[in-house]
């Protein structure tokens, strides 16, 4: 059951999948769901800056036996005591990478008011209960062993710790995990191994989750510890919030791109982007042409601006927000895109119900995520994006558990009266497609990414390179990328200078970025079912 891991429609009926410990099939050998669960929990230990038990995610799967798609949206939920006006907004200061303003004191980004209710464990459990084969305990065994051994510090992890060193020293529970003896740990070198972080508390928590399922996190002593740690710092995440959490589990209605059917784990930005691109013949343009990069940038810019302005958890909206991802809306947006001129920036957002109205412009604007993509011999295919938000999340760790809590409250618009404003139990806007595609009723292609909202660019660029231009998976991942969220256009430095000049000439304000750690170009994992696919 091979897997790849890297750090860094109409509204469907939603089933809140229960956490009962039902019977499990005991056939020998696991499948792609098992591989994804095992890889995710191992990443929770091995990449503590990117993902963890205190995080959340989005999972898509194609289940070959029934030729159907399964979606497990285990995104974060706002605590029950959350209010749409709970933060003081800094007027005129845009939050980097988001479509809303900065909060005073960064209280939605760092500290005890930043965590939302985590969904990672509940979501992986739901996926396993629906489609896994191996015993749950077995899937967590490797992660537990890594934690018991202690994670050896690599240079990559050391750099992440060093980047937030001063902040981490203000959070003693997290410092106790990543700063042994109150200093930076020693990284692995050619002369010897790296220092090992003490993760015995995390190992103990993992053993409880392995034995008891998600109830070990969402009820009892661990839940009490989370609520106590948050309350001690003035936060609002409670035991009631944890015990009431449930992911959204449903059979997602696929859409078509070329001759593929695909799902995105409910990400309408991904649907609208590919829906727009469906209206253009990218194959005729060539993967390195200015027109190719222009159309990708325009499609992403329009889709992001539309969704950042109007998208909302459909359970919290009387407006048909799922129409934002519909093929009909994408076709109307594509009709306004020119091949020889970039739309004025920032892109003016639209929604199906506002196409003939004057609306405000989007502010536009543009770390820490892990992705897993897995396939198996039976034809199952899985894509998972899992994260704790920023590097080391909110910086709040729970004493005695090894858990680092997410900072997903930053993903809500802190201004009242907006589509993505805060509401108790609500899931926030996201633009990170976990893409799984089939062709002729068989699994064909999957892609997931890490790196914040540029995940959209990573997944879309890779999918287009594979599907439209026929590149192999590794070549598709390596292809130079472009990204836009409705304002500037971020372009890979490997794109030819004459192509960049052409993009500037037709109206793109370019930001040229080299492919380096921490750049705007997300990391991507992808798989296809066989060498003949795509």
Image: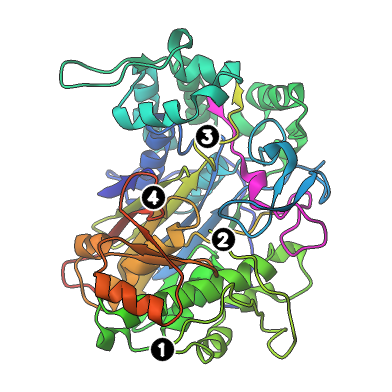
Q: CA distance from mark 3 to mark 1?
A: 45 Å
Front residue of this view, candidates 348 and 369: 348
Q: Position of residue 349 (x, y in %)?
A: 64, 76
Give the label, 2 or 3, closer to the camera. 2
Q: CA distance from mark 2 to mark 1?
A: 23 Å
Q: How many other residues sit within 10 Å of disc 3, few (<14), some (14-19) or many (≥20)?
A: many
* 403 relative to 377, above or below: above
* 128 relative to 69, above or below: above
Q: Magenta span: helix, strand or loop, mainly?
A: loop
Give the label, 4 or 3, closer to the camera. 4
Question: Disc 4, disc 3: CB below 8 Å?
Answer: no
Q: Which mark is residue 53?
A: 3
Of the image marks 2 and 1, the number of the one nearer the N terminus: 1
* 520 relative to 209, above or below: below
> Which residue is denoted by mark 2 in the rendering?
365
The residue shown at (22%, 72%) is: 533
Q: CA distance from mark 4 to mark 1?
A: 28 Å
Of the image marks 2 and 3, the number of the one nearer the N terminus: 3
Q: Position of residue 61 (x, y in %)?
A: 42, 60
**Span colored in magenta:** 400-426
Front residue of this view, candidates 257 and 205: 257
> Which residue is denoted by mark 4 in the rendering?
519
Q: How many other residues sit within 10 Å of disc 4, few (<14), some (14-19) or many (≥20)?
A: some
> Which residue is denoted by mark 1 in the rendering?
339
């Amino acid at each position: 059951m091979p897997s790849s891991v890297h750090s860094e429609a109409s509204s469907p009926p939603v089933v809140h999948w229960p956490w009962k410990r039902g019977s499990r099939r005991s056939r020998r050998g696991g499948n792609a769901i098992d591989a994804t669960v095992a890889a995710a929990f191992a990443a929770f230990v091995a990449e503590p800056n990117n993902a963890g038990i205190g995080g959340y995610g989005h999972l898509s799967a194609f289940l070959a036996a029934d030729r159907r798609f399964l979606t497990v949206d285990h995104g974060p939920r706002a605590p029950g005591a959350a209010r749409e006006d709970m933060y003081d907004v800094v007027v005129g200061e845009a939050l980097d990478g988001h479509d809303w303003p900065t909060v005073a004191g960064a209280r939605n980004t760092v500290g005890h008011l930043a965590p939302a209710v985590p969904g990672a464990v509940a979501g992986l459990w739901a996926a396993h209960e629906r489609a896994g084969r191996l015993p749950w305990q077995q899937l967590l065994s490797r992660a537990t062993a890594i934690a018991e051994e202690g994670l050896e510090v690599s240079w990559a992890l050391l750099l992440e710790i060093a980047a937030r060193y001063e902040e981490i020293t203000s959070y003693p529970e997290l410092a106790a995990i990543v700063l042994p003896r109150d200093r930076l740990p020693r990284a692995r070198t050619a002369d010897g191994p790296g220092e090992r972080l003490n993760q015995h508390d995390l190992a103990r928590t993992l053993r409880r989750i392995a034995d008891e399922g998600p109830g070990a996190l969402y009820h009892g002593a661990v839940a009490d510890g989370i609520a106590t740690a948050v309350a001690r710092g003035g936060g609002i995440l409670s035991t009631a919030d944890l015990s009431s959490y449930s992911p959204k589990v449903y059979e997602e209605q696929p859409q078509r791109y070329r001759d593929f059917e695909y799902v995105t784990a409910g990400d309408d930005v991904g649907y609208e982007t590919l829906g727009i691109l469906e209206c253009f013949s990218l194959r005729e343009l060539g993967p390195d042409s200015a027109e190719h990069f222009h159309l990708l940038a325009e499609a992403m810019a329009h889709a992001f601006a539309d969704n950042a302005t109007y998208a909302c958890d459909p359970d919290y909206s009387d407006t048909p927000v799922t129409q934002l991802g519909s093929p009909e809306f994408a076709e109307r947006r594509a009709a306004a895109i020119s091949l020889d001129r970039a739309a004025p920036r920032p892109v003016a957002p639209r929604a199906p119900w506002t196409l003939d109205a004057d609306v405000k412009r989007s502010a536009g604007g543009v770390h820490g995520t892990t992705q897993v993509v897995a396939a198996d011999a039976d034809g199952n295919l899985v894509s998972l994006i899992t994260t704790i938000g920023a590097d080391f999340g909110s910086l709040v760790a729970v004493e005695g558990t090894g858990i680092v809590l997410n900072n997903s409250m930053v993903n809500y618009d802190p201004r009242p009266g907006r589509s993505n404003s805060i509401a108790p139990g609500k899931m926030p806007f996201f633009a990170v497609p976990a893409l799984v595609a089939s062709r002729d009723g068989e699994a064909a292609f999957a892609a997931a990414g890490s790196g914040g909202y540029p995940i959209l660019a990573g997944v879309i660029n890779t999918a287009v390179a594979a599907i439209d231009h026929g590149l192999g998976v590794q070549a598709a991942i390596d292809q130079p990328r472009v990204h836009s969220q409705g304002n500037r256009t971020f372009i890979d430095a490997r794109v030819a200078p004459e192509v960049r000049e052409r993009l500037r000439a037709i109206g793109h304000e370019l930001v040229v970025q080299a492919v380096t750690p921490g750049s705007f170009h997300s990391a991507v994992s992808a798989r296809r079912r066989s060498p003949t696919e795509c």
